[in-house]
Image (cartoon, rainbow, N blue to C red):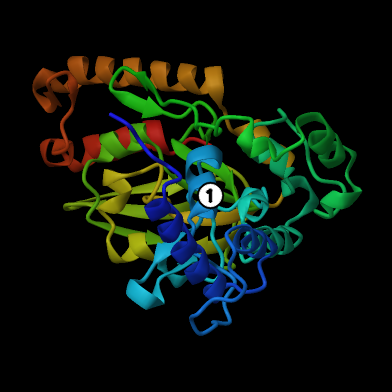
Amino acid sequence: MKILTNSERIWKIRKMIIELLLARVPDSKKLQELASYHGIEKPRFSLKDKDCILCGLCVRVCSERVGRSAIGFQKRGVDREVGIPFGKEFSEDCIGCGACTYVCPTGAIQMEAKTLQRFRKFRAEYRKCRYMMMGVVDYKLCPNNYQCWHCEVDQRMEELFGTHPALVFRKKEEEEPVQIYEFILFPEYLYSRGHIWARKFNGRIRVGVDDFARKLVGKISDLKSHGKNDRVNAGNELWELKIGDKKATMLAPFDLRVLDVNTDILDNPPIAYLDPYRKGWILDLEPYNPQEMRERMVWDNRAKILFKEDAESLHARFEKELGVTITDGGEIAPTLHKTLSPDSWNSLISEFLHRV
């Protein structure tokens, strides 16, 4: 088989495509150079006042190299465009790495500038360097108010690689979840002794029910939590879960102020059971004392030990007091709340979820 890439027919098709692109973005220098090379002086089509040629390079680099998928194609036909999913004003997944801007041939995409402007509103201890979020450096906070052109690290990256680091490094993958008995945890998350998970998210602390608490209480039918700007002291009720005719309260592991509530979970509480570590998050909050938060929480190996000890204690209690009928194939049955008396249920919740 002989493949021709520069035949007369291919040349005509290529010229037509360049004409169409040039009509869409007449001020693009790269397109002007291509047009000149192919003998196109002026496109035959009416000019449009748009910068984006819908090449998809920005979408691909964000998804395939950076691993964020902060932007994508939207709408159809002549209205097709590149933007933030669901028409949002900003993307929570964007880390301001600038890879999309770097590969854009027309300068149309400006996600980097918008995201860095939003990052500047974060408190100093939450201002992660974008190279840290990309996985290029292990740990670095930004001391330059995200004015990267003043940063030695940014200049060093440019000199070292000669291109954007996203095109050199593979995308940063999240750590794989770890299974302890039948319970799942993410080692990089923080966990309270009362089984509330926490992680940094866009300058805030996002919290929810971990997998141990989820499987202990079963399918959540209703949820009540504190509202925005509420202040909650350590040891006080942070939220209440309703499971059938039973209830389970969970306590604040440190002094905090609520910044936001996941309205999706208030409208559809079972999400907290179905996807506890992602869509099932409950609150965004701010700790009064970040150091106190870290002292009261565990992560990595200490989190694994917590889950292991609690799992063994839980199963020992089942076998001694309640019998193996409450388990389902070696795992806690989601209908456990129906099996236990009110006193046994309250004792179970107090032992495992009322610890600070």
Question: Viewed as shown, does residue 355 lie left or right of 49?
Answer: left
Look at the numbered disc 1 and give the secondary structure of its residue: strand
Instruction: Name the image quarter holding the N terminus.
Output: top left
Camera-nearest residue between 38 and 86: 38
Q: How many marks?
A: 1
Compared with 185, 96 (above or below) is below
Give the image quarter of residue 240: bottom left
Look at 47% across and 52% down and name the residue there. 237
Residue on which the image places disc 1: 206
Residue 249 on image: x %, y %: 38, 49
Q: Is residue 209 visible?
A: yes
The three-letter amino acid code for the residue at tag 1 is Arg
Please give the name of the residue rendered at 22% of the width and 55% of the height, measured from the top-left corner. 221
The x and y percentages for residue 159 are 84, 34
Q: Is residue 172 placed above or below 255 in the rendered structure?
A: above
Give x and y (percent) for residue 307.
41, 22
Please state if 335 lies on the left or on the right of 82 as rendered: left
Let me know if residue 85 appears in the view.
no
Looking at the image, the residue that sits furthest to the bottom is: 46
Which sits in the foreground, 16 or 316? Answer: 16
Q: Out of 22 and 114, give the one closest to the viewer.
A: 22
Nearer to the camera, 346 or 122:
122
**Residue lying at 46% horizontally and 36% vertically, measured from the top left:** 194
Residue 71 x/y as whole percent:
49, 58
- Seen from this angle, which residue lies furthest left? 325
Count neighbours of disc 1 (C-alpha within 10 A) and say few if under 14, some if 14 to 19, many if 20 or more: many
Name the residue: 48% across, 81% down.
45
In this rendering, would 285 be left or right of 355?
right
The quarter of the displayed image where residue 229 is located: bottom right
